[in-house]
Image: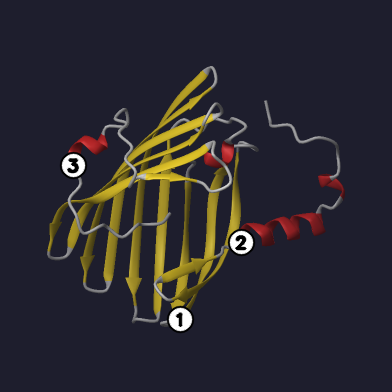
Amino acid sequence: IQWRLPDEMPLSPILLDPSVYFPTSKDLNIVAGNPYTMGINASGYLWKWDNGLIHGSHTQNSMWGLFDQRSVEVNLIQHYGALEMASGIAAYKYWMPGKQETQIGMSALLTYRFNQAISITAFGQYVTNPFYVSMAAYINTSAYGAYLTLQNEKIGLNLGVQREYDLFRRQWITDPIIMPSFKMGKTTIQIDFGSALRYIIQNLIHKDQYNQGPIIPHP
């Protein structure tokens, strides 16, 4: 779960309708080298006060002929000194050849900052209708967990654990969170090695189990 910083501009309520489609040259993001992939994003604050705000966003991701996803999100973010709380609600719509699906998501995040270098965060997200398709990597799913953050002006590290509902296996899985971050100018790069570490450990412990024919999802 990642909370995006709000843009310094208000967001029109019309953007919160997932059926509205109005790309402009400013919004279009056609992936270089793949003319069949397109992303459209618009976000901003709806209301703002001294220690908090309500933030909204509208996104569309398209792989023409294969998959189309649109979503709207509204997040409430509030600060109480060293404590930061956030909650949100979202609607997701998916179009695939011969199939349409809808999901509703609710999320929450709680962060306590001991100082500028150390903080602890707990988070959770619940998503309805956890369906499986071949494009499962783009489908939202339920998750919860917690992590400790250590950081300075240039580097940081998140250490923790999370549980996520695996759409392919149709069961909950546990992943460590091992996410170093590096700040390069105004850009922050984050890489989560938790899932890779779990796969390595599983392959070492259950080596024979992962060499038994083709991958077929559970019925």
Q: Is residue 139 visible?
A: no
Tell me, yes or no, if residue 186 can be seen here: yes
- Where residue 179 sits: x, y (%)? 54, 67
Looking at the picture, how far across and down is residue 110, in whole percent? 34, 61
Q: Secondary structure at mark 2?
A: helix
Residue 197 in the figure: left or right of residue 22? right
Foreground: 110 or 195? 195
Q: Tag count in the figure? A: 3
Applied colour scheme: secondary structure
Q: Which residue is mark 1?
A: 154
Dot 3 or dot 1: first in sequence order is: 3
> Which quarter of the rendering shows the N terminus?
bottom left
Residue 25's place in the image compared with 197, above or below, is above
Question: Rounded to the nearest whole Å, what is the CA distance between mark 3 and mark 1?
Answer: 36 Å
Vertical relation: 189 (above or below) 207: below
Q: Amino acid at mark 1?
A: Lys
Instruction: Return the mark for residue 194.
Output: 2
Label drawn at residue 12? 3
The circle drawn on residue 176 is none
Give the image quarter of residue 212. Answer: top right
Q: Is residue 185 left or right of residue 208?
A: left
Ranked by sequence position, the earlier of labels 2 and 1 is 1
**CB under 8 Å between discs 3 and 2:** no
Q: In x, y percent, where is residue 45?
A: 21, 52
Front residue of 70/202: it is 70
At 25% from the left edge and 57% from the top edge, which residue is drawn?
Answer: 7
How far, Cα to Cα, is label 3 from label 2? 38 Å
Do the residues under discs 3 and 1 have CB atoms within 8 angstroms? no
Foreground mark, 3 or 2, reads: 3
Query: Of the residues shown, which amino acid type is indicated by label 3?
Result: Ser
